[in-house]
Amino acid sequence: MNQEVDIYQDLKIRLISNGFEHGSKVRAEELRKEYGCSASTVREILFRLASVGLTDFQEQRGFRVPERSPQKLIELTHLRILLEGEGTSMSIRNGGVDWEARLTAAHHKLSHIEKRIHGTNDPSDLVAIWFASEKEFHETLISACGSEILKKMHGRIYAQFRQQLMVADRKFGFISENIDHHANILEAALSGDEHLTRMKIHDHLKRHLTGRTMGD
């Protein structure tokens, strides 16, 4: 993996997991020094991140982290429900035993982490692991859908969704519900019931349809 790809992936993770505050300026010169690369490399990466909605660019003002927006969260939630519901239904039809095994393994990891978070007063050491494991589970749900376009679109929507919630989700006030929700989604998917699986995905995400789950 070359340096540019490494920097892109690292910045992407920071942008969706509270590495930068909402609305803050992303300073190319500071990043150039931090990563030990050229200014042109940093600007190219920031433009790529802007193309997937994770930075905003304006002439004369440079790059900024998108502000939190209740309306944007509602729209992103609707799209996640649609894409994950359809993608998981397609995976149920196409995935077979291999997909079921991968989904079960991804859920096992996520469930273990969420139960540890639920049982501790200070989950700060588990934040990064949870972000990665939660992403892996939801990506695995749609991984056998057979549509690269759907998976790519879901990846963009998921990243923007996580960015909107990066403050609220670090508080883990939802974790007990999440444990049940993820288990219900897994059970429905493994049963092969597409309608029930869509319902459980909707139930998991519907709290965000009010736009009031972004934290302080």
Image (cartoon, rainbow, N blue to C red):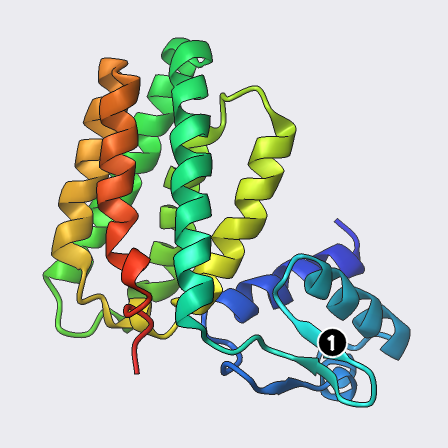
Report the side of 189 relative to 128 (left or right).
left
Is 152 above or below relative to 216?
above
Residue at image position (19%, 25%) is 187
Please name whichever residue, 72 or 38, is drawn nearer the observer in this view of the structure: 72
Is 136 above or below relative to 68?
above
Residue at image position (39%, 70%) is 70
Please name whichever residue, 102 or 61, is drawn nearer the observer in this view of the structure: 61
Q: Is residue 153 visible?
A: yes
**Which residue is under mark 1?**
57
Q: Where's residue 49, x and y in %?
A: 69, 63
Query: On the image, which quarter does residue 202 sit in?
Result: top left
Is 71 above or below relative to 24?
above
Q: Where's residue 104, x and y in %?
A: 29, 27
Q: Where's residue 79, x and y in %?
A: 46, 45
Residue at image position (14%, 52%) is 177
Q: Is residue 7 visible?
A: no
Could you tell me how many numbered marks the image carries?
Answer: 1
Element carrying mark 1: strand
Q: Where's residue 111, x and y in %?
A: 22, 44
Please name whichever residue, 94 or 42, is drawn nearer the observer in this view of the structure: 94
Residue at image position (46%, 54%) is 76
Badge 1: how crowded within 10 Å, few (<14), some, or many (20+)? some
* Three-letter amino acid code at the position of disc 1: Phe
Report the side of 47 relative to 173 (left or right).
right
Is 19 above or below relative to 81?
below
